[in-house]
Image (spheres, rainbow, N blue to C red):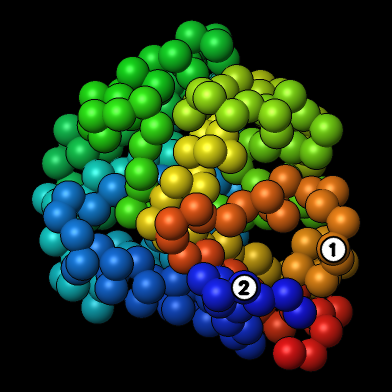
Amino acid sequence: MRTRANEEIIILPDLAGISETAAQRFAALARERAPFSVALSGGGTPRGLYEKLAAAPFKAQIQWTRVHVFWGDERCVPPDDPGSNYHLARETLLDRVPIPSENIHRMRGECAPEAAARLYDDELRAFFGSPMPRFDLVLLGMGVDGHTASIFPNSTTLREITRAVAPASAEYADRPASRITLTLPAINAARCVIFLVSGADKAEILREVLDSENLRYPAQLIHPVMGKLVWIVDAAAAALLEAV
Ligand code: 6PG
């Protein structure tokens, strides 16, 4: 199993364990910095984490007025659409914690992808004061095809090296195809990137991503330049990994 100096792989028994460990890391990182900028991930895996952060003991441990929430990617659907990553975070976390509305930096999924990407780029520049954001934390998931955020295999987004945000499009599961995503440079500029990976269906791709030397998948290209990479995975997803 590949581990580099600034990388950590944590294996928990199940998704509940992933959510608890991720909540502990989130709360610890949020205590270190003010403001604390975090890019949330979408999909199904982070739901338990978001619910934990909105409940005891984590809700009271985090100073929500210091937290600024962004997204790693968004589907191009309205914010109240069940397919929206914002909608997931709103119903499981943001509506349950005292975070000021001005600290919620939503990707405009209701806009056309290119327009939404440009709007978000403006929002990032306004907050970070530079063309490339340096998030304190980026949360990521990984698809069975090795995509992360909305950076998919063989996509043009993979080759984006100047923009922080780009439009994307991909058929994946039953999810909306048209998307907006942070790019590899934006993610790799983060102080900390945490992958949450759960389930037996991810075992094969996780082995490929962590144990294979040939770089075929977007998730293999996530290496914070001056930051830490943490994989928080469950036993089912880790079942095929080589022993340390
Ligand atoms: C999205 C996510 C995407 C997700 C993976 C894993 O918008 O869909 O950002 O990158 O994290 O597809 O999704 P699951 O957690 O549902 O397996």
> Residue 183, located in which quarter of the rendered image?
top right
One can see residue 175 in this view: no
- Give, as a three-letter code, the residue at label 2: Arg
Residue found 44% across the figure and 71% down from its top: 22
Task: List x then y, in percent, for residue 7.
Answer: 56, 72
- Where is the N terminus found, in terms of image quarters? bottom right
Q: Quadrant of the C terminus?
A: bottom right
Q: CA distance from mark 1 to mark 2?
A: 13 Å
Question: Which residue is the site of mark 1?
Answer: 213
| Residue type pointed to by label 1 | Glu
Evaluate whether residue 118 shows in this view.
yes
In primary-sequence order, the first of circles 1 and 2 is 2
Confirm if mark 1 falls within 8 A of ligand 1: no
Identify the residue shown where x is 58% and y is 64%. Answer: 196
| Label 2 environment density (alpha carbons within 10 Å; few <14, some 14–19, many ≥20) | few
Q: Is residue 58 above or below residue 133?
A: below
Secondary-structure class at tag 2: loop
Checking the image for residue 238, the label placed there is: none
Q: Is residue 56 left or right of residue 182?
A: left
Give the left or right position of residue 201, taking residue 91 as reference: right
Asked if the beta carbon under badge 2 is closer than 8 A to the nearest atom of ligand 1, the reply is no
Residue that carries the numbered disc 2 in the rendered image: 4
Residue situated in front as seen by the camera: 196 or 176: 196
> In the rendered image of this protein, does residue 217 appear above or below residue 172?
below
Residue at position x 58%, y 56% in the image = 223
